C-alpha cells in the first residue's frame, strides 16, 4: 500500500477517472500510430495536472516500467534514470 504522502498527490491527479485507460497500453497488440495517439492524449492530460511533478518523481523513484507517468513514457523515464539526473523535475519541464 502507498504511504500517506503518495496517496495525497494521487488523489489530485488529472488522470483519475474513465480516461485513465490512455495512460497504459491495451491488452491487445497496438500499432505504432495507435500508441503514439494514445500517448499524445495521455500527455495532454498530464499538461493540465497539478501534481505532474510528484507523479514523475514517484515513477522515476520506483522505476515504473509501464505507462505514462508525469508526462513521460517508459523510454523517456528510462533516459532520466540512465543519465542519473538528480531531479526528474528538470526533465519534465524540458
Image (cartoon, rainbow, N blue to C red):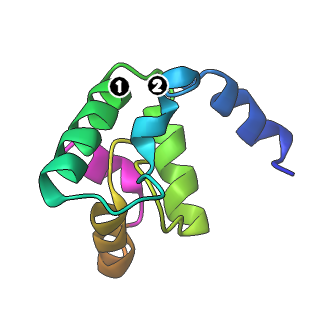
The picture quadrant where one finds residue 40 is top left
- 38 and 77: which one is in front? 38
Mark sitting on residue 10 = none
Q: Please state the horizontal and vertical placement of residue 8, each as a whole percent of the image.
A: 73, 28
Position of 55 relative to 83 (above/below): above
**Mark 1 to mark 2: distance in Å?**
9 Å
The residue lying furthest to the bottom in this view is 82
- Highlighted magenta segment, given as a residue range: 86-94
Q: Quadrant of the C terminus?
A: top left
In what element is the residue under mark 1?
A: helix
Task: Say if 17 sits above or below 40 in the image.
Answer: above
| Residue 7, position as x, y percentages in the image | 76, 35
The residue lying toward the viewer, choosing from 53 and 72, is: 72
- Work out whether mark 1 precedes mark 2 in sequence or the reverse, and give the earlier one: 2
Which of the 4 quarters of the picture holds residue 47?
top left
Q: Residue at x 52, y 42 (%)?
A: 55
Most extreme residue toward the front is 28
- Residue that appears at 29% across and 36% down: 43
Give the residue at mark 1. Answer: 45
> Is residue 94 left or right of 91 when viewed as pictured?
left
Which residue occupies 35% across, 25% down? Answer: 45
* Residue assigned mark 2: 19
Element class at badge 2 = helix
Per the image, is 84 magenta? no
Query: Is residue 14 among the parts visible in the rendering?
Result: no
Q: Visible in this render: residue 9?
A: yes
* Residue at (27% x, 41% y) in the render: 38
Q: Nearer the viewer, residue 58 or 31?
A: 31
Q: Are marks 1 and 2 in contact (CB under 8 Å)?
A: yes
Amino acid at each position: 500500500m502507498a504511504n500517506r504522502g503518495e496517496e495525497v498527490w494521487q488523489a489530485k491527479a488529472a488522470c483519475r477517472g474513465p480516461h485513465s485507460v490512455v495512460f497504459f497500453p491495451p491488452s491487445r497488440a497496438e500499432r505504432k500510430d495507435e500508441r503514439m495517439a494514445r500517448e499524445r492524449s495521455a500527455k495532454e492530460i498530464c499538461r493540465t495536472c497539478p501534481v505532474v511533478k510528484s507523479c514523475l518523481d514517484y515513477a522515476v523513484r520506483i522505476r515504473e516500467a509501464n505507462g505514462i507517468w508525469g508526462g513521460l513514457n517508459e523510454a523517456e523515464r528510462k533516459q532520466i534514470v540512465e543519465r542519473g539526473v538528480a531531479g526528474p523535475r528538470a526533465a519534465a519541464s524540458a
